[in-house]
Image (tube, grey):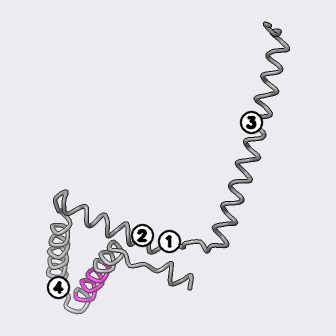
Amino acid sequence: MADNKRRGEDADDERLDGELDAAGDAGEESASDGDSSRSRAESVDRSKSRNQGDKVGPFGRVPRFVREVVAELRKVIWPTRKELLTYASVVIVFVAVMLAIVAGLDLAFAEGVLWVFGNPS
C-alpha cells in the first residue's frame, strides 16, 4: 500500500520519459540505417516543438503549477492517525521541556543579575 502512495504521475517524469524514448528511438534508427544526421535532425525538431510548448504566458503557468503541486502531493506518504498523534505528542513534550529549560535559565540569570548589581528597592 505504501508503494502505491509513493507512485505518482508527474508531468516532468512523463516529459523525461518521452525524451528518453525519443533519444532511444534516434539511437536505434542511426544504428540500423547508418544515417545518423537524419535521426539527429528529427530528435532536434521534436525537442524544439516540445520546448515551444513549454513557453506559455503567466496565465498558462498557473494551471501547470497547480498540476505539478497536485502531482507532488500524490507522492506524499501521509501519516496514519496513530502516527500523527504520536508525532504531535513528541513535539509538544519536546517544546514543553525546552520551555522549562529556557524559563529556568531566564530565572537563574535574572536572580544572578540582581545578586551582582543589587536590588534597587
Q: Nearer the viewer, residue 53 or 92?
A: 92
Per the image, label 4 sits on a secondary structure element best described as loop
Q: Nearer the viewer, mark 3 or mark 2?
A: 3
Q: Which residue is mark 2?
A: 72
Q: Nearer the viewer, mark 4 or mark 3?
A: 3
Per the image, label 2 sits on a secondary structure element best described as helix
Between discs 3 and 2, the one toward the N terminus: 2
The residue shown at (19%, 91%) is 33
Q: Is residue 42 above or below residue 84?
A: below
Measuring from the top left, give residue 44's x and y in whole percent: 18, 73
Hey, what amino acid is under mark 2? Glu
Image quadrant occupied by the C terminus: top right
Q: Which residue is mark 1?
A: 76
Q: Choose top left, top right, bottom left or bottom right for residue 39.
A: bottom left
Q: Which residues are magenta?
A: 20-29
Q: Nearer the viewer, mark 1 or mark 3?
A: 3
Answer left or right for 89 relative to 40: right
Q: Is residue 24 magenta?
A: yes
The residue shown at (16%, 59%) is 57
Q: Which residue is mark 3?
A: 102
Label annotation for residue 35: 4
The residue shown at (44%, 70%) is 73
CA separation, marks 4 and 2?
41 Å
Q: Is residue 48 above or below residue 119?
A: below
Between discs 4 and 2, the one toward the N terminus: 4
Hey, what amino acid is under mark 1? Val
Between discs 1 and 3, the one toward the N terminus: 1
Hey, what amino acid is under mark 4? Asp
Q: Is residue 117 above or below residue 72?
A: above
Hey, what amino acid is under mark 3? Val
